[in-house]
Every structure is written in structure tokens, then in C-alpha cells.
Amino acid sequence: MDFNEWKPIYESILKDMGFSREGDEQAALILSAMLNTSNSTDVSELKVLIEEKDVLVCGNAPVLAQELDLIDSDDFVIIAADGATAVLVDKGTIPDVIVTDLDGDVEKEIIANKEGSIMVVHGHGDNIDKLNTYVPRLSRIIGSTQAEPLENVFNFGGFSDGDRCAYLAKEFGAASITLVGFDFDDENVDPIKKKKLKWARLLIENLNK
């Protein structure tokens, strides 16, 4: 993702959500300093894994488990959005990639990471404490940000975990992207989550254009 292309969308999201760009930038710097050759992996691994493959992006809506029962996940490279990892692990499936801001069941994500999942760990202004708590327990990490990227912290596009999964798949040349576990019209969420779902729908629609 070209940051100059992403920047006006990002600024609109910040304004709508009332979030701080400075907080995002601070989180990116902190995450960057935590990554080294022992706990991180190169983005070329994502390219090898995803390019020209059929990708299954798993969101964490309540319908995920039901929708997974209707599909043969073995046919796909699996990218899980944060909390979706727990559903997959409980079904005996280890995602190939986990895109997370460490807001879900991180213990299940750690289990999957030990089994080989690449961790695309996202830093933003509200999760600096979780970066400090969990990054030292993870390996095969690729850092991500929604602000301006750094040398080892990337911006692949997208805002919330689910749509960032889709943007990641697009960025690395997936042959197809199938979404499961997405409910953009979920009424059983708080007002902030409703705004995030609105942006997720918009961003994924833009990705399809």
C-alpha cells in the first residue's frame, strides 16, 4: 500500500473515530524497537505464502464457526483476524497468518504462533500496553501500523483486523479472497464497533474496485 494513497482515508478514519495519529505513531515506534532478528520474520514469507493462492479471510463475527462448517478450509491459505484465531484453534485448525492488535484471545494466538502461524502484529494508540505484554512472548512477527510505515513496521492498508486481513491478501497477490465470519450489520455491538464495521465494509468494497 502506497501511504500517500492511504493517507486521506486514514485521516478520515481518525476524524470519524476520534483517534490520535500521534498515538498510532508512538505505538509504531515502540513496536519497531521491540522487533529484531530473533522474533521477527521477513515480509517475503508472506509473498511466498499468499501469492497466486486462494485465501480464506476469517473475521470474528459470531457466524464464523457456522460458516467454517460449510467450507473446506484445507483448500485455502488461512488469514485469521485476531479473535477468529480462537475459533479456528478450537476446531483444530492453525491459521497460516494471524492479523492482530492483541485484543482477542491472545493465549490461543500464542498457541497458534508456536504451531507456525505468522503474526502480523498491529500497533495503535490504544494497545501499547498489550504490545509490551505480548510481543516478548511471540515469534515470526511482522509489525504493522495504520500510520506512516517505518523500516520494519509496515502499512498494508485497512483499519480493523478483518479488513486488514483482506488488504494483506491483496497486497501479496492472492488469486482469490473469500471472506467468512463477517457481519457488517451486527446490531449487538457498541457504537464504536458499529463505526468500525462501517469502515470495514467501505474499505473492503474499495478493495474490490
Image: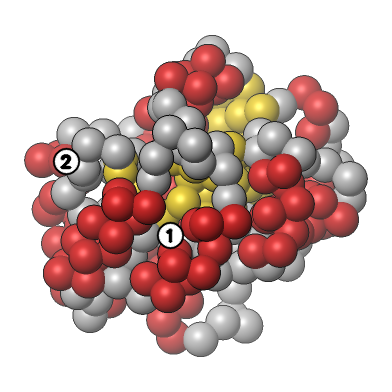
**Which quadrant of the structure image shows residue 23?**
bottom left
Left or right relative to 123: residue 79: right
Quarter of image, res 35: top left
Question: Considering the numbered disc 2 on the image, is that residue within a helix, a strand or a loop?
Answer: helix
Q: Which residue is mark 1?
A: 160
* Amino acid type, callout 1: Ser
In this orientation, does residue 78 appear?
no
Q: Which residue is mark 2?
A: 3
Q: Is residue 87 visible?
A: yes
Residue projecting furthest to the front:
38
Q: Where is residue 27 drawn, in percent x and y? A: 29, 63
Q: Mark 2 is on which residue type?
A: Phe
Q: Position of residue 96 (x, y in %)?
A: 66, 34
Residue projecting furthest to the bottom: 190
Q: Is residue 31 left or right of residue 93?
A: left
Q: Position of residue 188 (x, y in %)?
A: 62, 83
- In terms of depth relative to the viewer, which is nearer, 134 or 87? 134
Q: Position of residue 173 (x, y in %)?
A: 44, 20
Label 2 CA crowd tier, 10 Å (few <14, some 14–19, many 20+): some
State the residue at coordinates (70%, 35%).
116
Secondary structure beneath label 1: loop
Left or right? Give the position of 51 relative to 167: right
Q: Nearer the viewer, residue 73 or 149?
A: 149
Q: Relative to 182, does residue 139 appear above or below in the rendering?
A: above
Quarter of the rendering containing residue 152: top left
Ranked by sequence position, the earlier of labels 2 and 1 is 2
